[in-house]
Amino acid sequence: MRVPLLIEQYGWSEALRRAFEPHARAGYVPGRIVVQQREANLVATDAGNLSASLSGRLRHEAREAGHPAAGDWVAVSANTGEGKATIHAVLPRRTAFVRRAADSVQTLQVIAANIDVVFVVTSMNADLNPRRLERFLAAAWQSGARPVVVLTKADLCEHPEGRAAEIATLAAGCPVLIVSARQDVGVGGLMGHISPGETCVLIGSSGVGKSTLVNALLGEERMATQEIRAADSRGRHTTSHRQLVLLPGGGLILDTPGIREVGLVDADVGLSTVFDDIERLARNCRFSDCTHGTEPGCAVRDAMDGGLLDADRWAHFQKLSQELAAAELSKAGTAQEVGRRRLAAQQRTYRSTKRDLRNLS
């Protein structure tokens, strides 16, 4: 009987084995990034967990392509005696939860790679923000994984079922679960969305109870937690890095630091999914190029006037659409600038080569 590989616990599959064959021939071994930190990642391999840094070549390439993320499958050369490894390549990602970096319009930041389910977590206390939830959902649908809305801290809400029904109207058909880790409500239902070998990521603002949720799923206090602030009902940031955790049922959960804002980029599909009701309305306008302003026969404006479309939801859809358009324009401008610099460098190299050849002749 074949002895299962240790990395099979982390989702290693036949498809990954085939994709890894060129790296195996080069003498590397497969691993998955289970803890993502600035200086060194923790990589799970068949030899155990190793502290891994990037090779010089990969570090150089990462300046443009981005650094490996938690959940990535990588090719490493291992020094098991010292518990260290060097990452030489990253396997192609099946899915990825991506946001725009907080300090950049153009730079993409991969929060989680190779995920199957995105748990969009928000608490049912006074910090519940439907507009922020729409933004998170757009990014979650865009990732390629299955989104599930998780409403935590139900014990702090007087009418959790009614609030969940309101949120369900924004959730674009994905499941909406009510959870109270303190009262052990809904945790079992959450496990039903995690199949063995699948990877789930918890996405949500600081203090919504992600680490508490991980502890409930694990059945032990592994993740640090803190109480919410009484002044504004918001939680305190506890998780400081992204960490992939094995669950007793055979699945995996990736706990992430709290994210209060997700800058959308390349999220047209996600935005269309979350705001499908608005896009269907727009298709019924009299004019195909309707700006939904003063034109006659505007189905969007008629829906707002008739109370069928919330004005705040429409305004948020416009805001996110403009944000995406601005990001696309900025990205196009950056690509042109990169191309111009590359061409200039090639021309300098060409002139330098011609000069050297003349000096030799």
Image (spheres, helix red, strand yellow):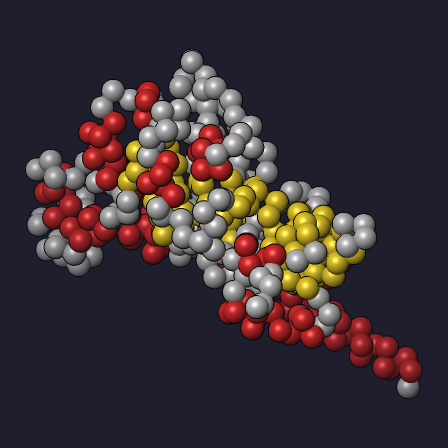
Please provide percent x and percent y for residue 350: 74, 75
Please provide percent x and percent y for residue 344: 67, 66
98 w.r.t. 5: above or below: above
* 279 and 21: which is toward the camera: 21
Please provide percent x and percent y for residue 214: 47, 36
Q: Is residue 357 left or right of residue 23?
A: right
Res 84 seen here: yes
* 118 and 136: which is toward the camera: 118
Q: Is residue 151 left or right of residue 329?
A: left
Q: Is residue 106 left or right of residue 293?
A: right
Res 74 seen here: no
* 252 and 115: which is toward the camera: 252
Q: Quadrant of the image for the C terminus?
A: bottom right
Q: Residue furthest bottom?
A: 361
Residue at left offset 40%, top offset 19%: 233
Please provide percent x and percent y for residue 270: 34, 52
Total number of numbered discs in the rendering: 0
Residue at left offset 45%, top offset 20%: 228
Q: Is residue 280 left or right of residue 121?
A: left
* 297 and 142: which is toward the camera: 142
173 w.r.t. 346: above or below: above
Residue at left offset 57%, top offset 42%: 243
270 w.r.t. 2: above or below: above
Q: Quadrant of residue 289?
A: bottom left
Q: Quadrant of the image for the N terminus?
A: bottom right
Residue at left offset 58%, top offset 62%: 4
Q: Quadrant of residue 122?
A: top left
